[in-house]
Image (spheres, rainbow, N blue to C red):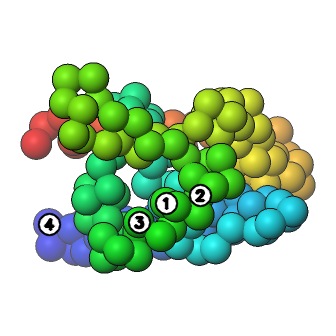
Amino acid sequence: MAARRQNVAAVAADVAAALEQIRRMLRASIAAQARQMSVPLTSPQLLALEVLVDELQTSGGGLSLSELSTRMGLSHSTVSGIVDRLEARKFLRRTKREEDRRFVEIQLTDAIQRWLREELPAARTDPLAAALAHSSAAERAAIRDAVVALASLLAEAADEQ
């Protein structure tokens, strides 16, 4: 039983390392696309956008400056400057909440949200498609089936907790 647990742990470590490598490569592809802009984004600006994208996908809304600072792990004043620069470039907007006009929420602009819906998916899948183009149909099916199975197992494990 202990040997089986060690084997499972070793496989889990290998899978985690491979997934991390894939994540880094996909993020690098998206970052390369951002660097090709006429005025490239800095790493902290990209991080702010990533945090806001995650929030949009989770809640459909934005974040306060304090919450954005916390999630980025940066000081309020640093994030305020980042938000100012992104707002000047029309990536973000500050809006007051209807129920409490004192509360300002930082949101992605409509143009950025459109980019997320229409262009980002290709930026994420193009590197995968390019890599998979070098594989056989059987290899592609095996990769797809394994990743789908892993996602299902992770969802089941999360439900059990």
Give residue 114's mark. Answer: none
Residue contact at pointers 2 and 1, CB within 8 angstroms: yes
Image quarter in which the N terminus is found: bottom left
**Residue at (19, 30) in percent of width and height:** 100
**Residue at (59, 58) in percent of width and height:** 86
Q: Which residue is mark 2?
A: 86
**Residue 7 in sight in this render:** no
Residue contact at pointers 2 and 3, CB within 8 angstroms: no
Give residue 1's mark. Answer: 4
Frontmost of labels 4 and 2 is 2
Frontmost of labels 4 and 3 is 3
Q: Residues within 10 Å of mark 2 (few under 14, many from 20)?
A: some
Is tag 4's residue or tag 2's residue first in the polypeptide sequence? 4
Q: Mark 1: which secondary structure?
A: helix
Is tag 4's residue or tag 3's residue first in the polypeptide sequence? 4
Q: Which residue is mark 1?
A: 83
**Residue at (59, 74) in percent of width and height:** 43
Q: Residues within 10 Å of mark 1 (few under 14, many from 20)?
A: many
The residue under label 4 is which amino acid type? Met
Is tag 2's residue or tag 3's residue first in the polypeptide sequence? 3
Residue contact at pointers 1 and 3, CB within 8 angstroms: yes
